[in-house]
Amino acid sequence: MSPEITITDTTRSGRITMVLALCAVLALACAPLVATSAHLNLMVQIFAYLALATLWNLLAGFSGLVSVGQQAFVGIGGYALFGLTIFADLHPLLALALAGIIGAVIALPVAGLLFRLRGAYFAIGSWVAAEVFRLLASQISALGGGSGTSLPARIVTSMASSRVWREYVIYWTGLAIAVVVIGLTIFLLRSRFGLALRAIHYNEGAARASGVNVTRVKLIVFVLAGFGTAMVGALIFLQKLRISPDAAFSVNDWTAFVIFMAVIGGIGRIEGPIIGCLIFFVLRETLADMGALYLMMLGLVAIVIMLRAPRGIAGWLSEKLGFDLVPLSRRVVFAKSKGDSHV
Amino acid sequence: MDWVNSITQGILVGGLYAMFAAGLSLIFGVMRLVNIAHGDLVVLAAYLALVVTTTLGLDPLTSLLIIVPLMALIGYALQRFLLNRTLGDDLLPPLLVTFGLSVILQNGLMEIFTPDSRKLQAGAIETATLTLSSDLSLGILPLLQFGVAVAIIGGLQLLSYRTAWGRAFRATSDDQTTVQLVGVDPRHVFAMAMALSLAVIAVAGVFLAVRANFDPSMGPARLIFGFEAVIIGGLGNLWGTLAGGVILGVAQAIGAKIDPGWQLLAGHLVFLIVLAVRPEGFFPRVQH
C-alpha cells in the first residue's frame, strides 16, 4: 500500500506572513488618524511604487517580459485621468478605474507589436512604445501639449470639499490599489495560471509541449500589468495635480527606480519588490540631496547585486531562514501513518 | 526641391544612425548581448572628444585618433571585467547591468559636465558645402559622415567574412564551447567584439558632437535610433543596417517637414509599421 499524499501550497511561514500582512494593512488603513499630511503624501508615493514594482516583477520576474517601457502605462493612466475628468467631467475616482481599463485596452495592440521582438529586443521595443506615447501626448494641445497642464480646481474639489479629506481619499485609494495589486498577483501566481507561468519560466519548450498556450499566457500578464500600471499612473497624477509628457512618461521615475527596487529586493519573489521599495524610500529620504551622485549609487548597487546576489535580499533571506515568506510553490505532503505498517 | 533637400539630409543623417546600429548589431550577433548603455557610450565619446579637443587644441576629426583607441580600450575592459560575468541563459543580468551602467554614465556626465548642451567646433569644414544645383547643396561634413559610415560598415563586413577575427566572432557566436577546442578564448573574443563596437561608437559620438548640440541625457534616444535601424534593416545584416538607418533618417526628415513635432514620431511610426508588416526587417540575413 502506498502512502497517502496530498499537495499543499500553504506553509506555516506563509500563514504567519499573511496574518502579519493583514495586521499591517489594518494599521495602515487607520494611519490618517495619527499621521501628518506630509507623511500621508509620502505613503501614497510608497503605495504607488509598491504596486509598480510588483507589476514589473510579475512581467520580468515571472513571465520573461523584461520591459523598460512601463512608463508608457503610467503616462497613459495619468493622461486618461486628466482627459476623463476635464473633458467628460467624470468623478476622479471613476476616471481612475476607467484609466485602468484604457491601459488594458491599449496594452493589447502594443503587445501585438512588441511580442514580435524576442528577449532583450522586446525590452528596447517597449521603450520605443513609451516614447511614441510620450510624443503623442505632447501633441494633445487641449492638455497643454509639451508643457502639460494642471487639474482644474472644480475637479479637485469634486473629490471632497476639504483638503484634509481629499488627502484621506487619495491615501485610502493608494492603499487599496497597492493591496489589491499585491493580493491579486499572489492569487494569480498561486493559481493554475501561475503554474503555467512557472512552467514557461523554467522551460518554454516543455511548457508548450505540455499544452500551455505561451503567447496567450504572456498576453494576459501584459494586459493585466497594463491595467494595473495605468491605474497607478492615474493615482500618481491625481496626487501631483499636474501632468506633462516628460513627467508622465519618465523612464527614470517609473522604470529605472522600479527596476532598482525589484533588483535589490529580489526578482521573481513576491516579497522582493516590497523589501526593495522600502529600502529605496529609506535611501531616498536620507540621500536624495546628493542628486546625480545618489542616482549613480543606485545604479552601482543594482549592478553589484545583479552580479553578486542575483536573487536579491529576499532570495538571500529565504536561503538563510530556510523558508519563503510568501510561498508560491506546491509541495507534496505524505500522510502520517497511523500505526499500521506499510511500505 | 525643398523636399529633395530634406530627403537628402535625411539620407545623410541615416549614416549616423547606421553607425549607432552597427555597434549594437555587432555585439548582439557575437554574444546575444543588448547593451542598454549603448547610446550613453556614444554620448561619453562625445564628451571625451570635448575634453581632448579643448585640452590638446586638436580639431574634432583629428581627436578620433585618440578617442577611438580609448573607447576600444574601455570596451575591452567593460566586457572582460563586467559584462562577461552577466552572460548566460538568463536574460535579466546583462539587461539590468547595462541599464545600471546607463544610469551611472548619464548621471556621471551630468555631475562632471553639467546638464548644459555642448557642441564641438570643427572650423571651416562645418560650413563647407558642395553645390549640386542652385537649390540643392550638400554639406561636406554630412557627406563625410555618410562616407565614413559606409566605410565602417564595409570594413566590418570584410572583417566578419574575410579575416581570422571574423571567423572567431562567428564561430564563438555559433558555439562557445566548441571554439575552445581550437584554442579560442570566448572571453577574449567577446571583449574584442565589445572593443570594436565601442570603436564604432567613438566615431559616431564625435560626428554627433560636431553636427549638433549634445547633452548628458540624449543617450537613450541614440540607443533607440540604432535599435530601430537594426530592426528595420533586418537582424544580422550589416548592409541592411545601413539601409535601416537611411530609412529612419528619411522618415524623420519627412516628418519634420510636415510638422517639427512629428520628426521623431515619424521615425518611430515607420519602425512600428515595419514591425507590424515585416517583423524580420527588410533584409534579414537568416530567412525563416
Image: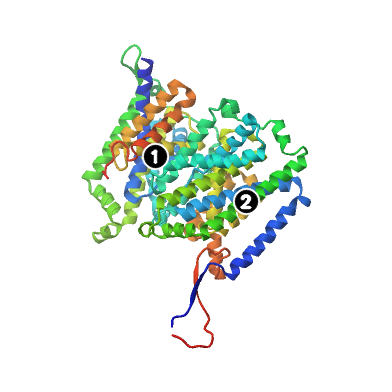
Total numbered badges shown on the rendered structure: 2
Quadrant of image for the C terminus of chain A = bottom left
Q: Name the residue type under label 1.
A: Phe
Neighbor class of circle 2 (other Cα within 10 Å; few <14, some 14-19, many 20+) is many
- Measured as percent of width and height from the top left, residue A5 is found at 48, 75
| Subunit under mark 2 | A
Gap in Å between the C-alphas at discs 1 and 2? Answer: 35 Å
- Residue A144: tell me if it is visible: yes
Neighbor class of circle 1 (other Cα within 10 Å; few <14, some 14-19, many 20+) is many
In the displayed image of the protein, which residue is found farthest to the top? B134
Which label is found at residue B150? Answer: none
Q: Name the residue type under label 2.
A: Ala
Q: Nearer the viewer, residue A108 or B135?
A: A108
Q: Nearer the viewer, residue B63 or B242?
A: B242
Task: Classify residue B270 by image quadrant.
Answer: top left
Q: How is the image coloured?
A: rainbow
Determine whether label 1 and label 2 are within 8 Å by CB.
no
Which label is found at residue B227? Answer: 1
The residue identified by callout 2 is: A178
| Subunit under mark 1 | B
Of helix, strand and loop, which one carries label 2?
A: helix
- Measured as percent of width and height from the top left, residue B47 is found at 47, 37
User: Where B48 sits versus A57, above or below?
Assistant: above
Quadrant of image for the N terminus of chain A = bottom left
Look at 27% across and 45% down and name the residue there. B288
Q: Nearer the viewer, residue B278 or A286?
A: B278
Of helix, strand and loop, which one carries label 1?
A: helix
1 or 2: mark nearer the eye: 2
